[in-house]
Image: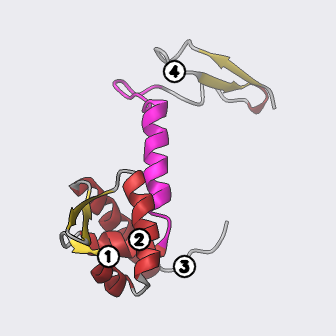
C-alpha cells in the first residue's frame, strides 16, 4: 500500500491518500474548529488513567468520593490492609489524584478534585453497561 501525505484538504491537518486503494479523496477531512489535544495534556491524561487501572485504587477512589477518610477506614472499605492502601495512596498522591492532611498521628485523604470522582463514576458506569450488554460475536 502506498500512502502519501498532503495538506491540500485540511487547513493544518494531514490528509492520507491511499494511492493504490482507489480512494477518491483524502481519508481524513478536517472538521472546522476541531483540534487535537496537546501532547503534554494527552500524556498527563494517560498517566491519570493508568492510575485508575487497578481494582484496589478504584475502590479507594470510590470511597473517597464520599468525603475525607483515614487509611484505616479506606482499608476496611476496600477490603485490604492499611499497608496496601498506604502504598496505593502514595502513588495516587504523586499522580495528583488525591490530597492529604495530617491530624496528630492520623492522615486523612480526599480526592484532589471533583473530576477524579467523575472519571471513576464514568469508568464504573461504562463497565456496568458493558456487562449488561448482550455479547457480540467477533467479526
Mark 1 or 4: in front is 1
Residue found 41% across the figure and 71% down from its top: 86
Q: What residue is disc 4 on? A: 13
Distance, label 3 to label 4, CA atoms, is 37 Å
**Callout 4 environment at 10 Å: few (<14), some (14 to 19), or many (20+)?**
some
- At numbered mark 4, what does the secondary structure look like: helix, strand or loop? loop
Which quadrant would the C terminus be assigned to in this image? Answer: bottom right
| Residue 39 belongs to the span the image colors magenta | yes
Residue found 37% across the figure and 56% down from its top: 93
Q: What residue is disc 1 on? A: 71
Q: What residue is disc 2 on? A: 86
Instruction: Give the residues drawn in magenta, as a range.
Output: 30-54
Q: Is residue 25 visible?
A: no
* First reached walking from the N terminus: tag 1 or tag 4: 4
Q: What residue is disc 3 on? A: 135
Distance, label 2 to label 3, CA atoms, is 38 Å
- At numbered mark 2, what does the secondary structure look like: helix, strand or loop? helix
Horizontal side of 33 relative to 21 (left or right) equals left
Mark 1 or 3: in front is 1
* First reached walking from the N terminus: tag 1 or tag 2: 1
Residue found 50% across the figure and 65% down from its top: 53
Amino acid at each position: 500500500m502506498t500512502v502519501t501525505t498532503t495538506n491540500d484538504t485540511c487547513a493544518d491537518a494531514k490528509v492520507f491518500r491511499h494511492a493504490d486503494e482507489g480512494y477518491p479523496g483524502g481519508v481524513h477531512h478536517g472538521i472546522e474548529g476541531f483540534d487535537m489535544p496537546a501532547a503534554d495534556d494527552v500524556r498527563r491524561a494517560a498517566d491519570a488513567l493508568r492510575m485508575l487501572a487497578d481494582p484496589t485504587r478504584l475502590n479507594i477512589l470510590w470511597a473517597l468520593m464520599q468525603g475525607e477518610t483515614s487509611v484505616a477506614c479506606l482499608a476496611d472499605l476496600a477490603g485490604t490492609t492499611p499497608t496496601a492502601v498506604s502504598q496505593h495512596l502514595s502513588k495516587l498522591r504523586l499522580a495528583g489524584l488525591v490530597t492529604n492532611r495530617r491530624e496528630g498521628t492520623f492522615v486523612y485523604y480526599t480526592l484532589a478534585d471533583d473530576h477524579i470522582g467523575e472519571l471513576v463514576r464514568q469508568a464504573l458506569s461504562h463497565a456496568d453497561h458493558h456487562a449488561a450488554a448482550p455479547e457480540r460475536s467477533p467479526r
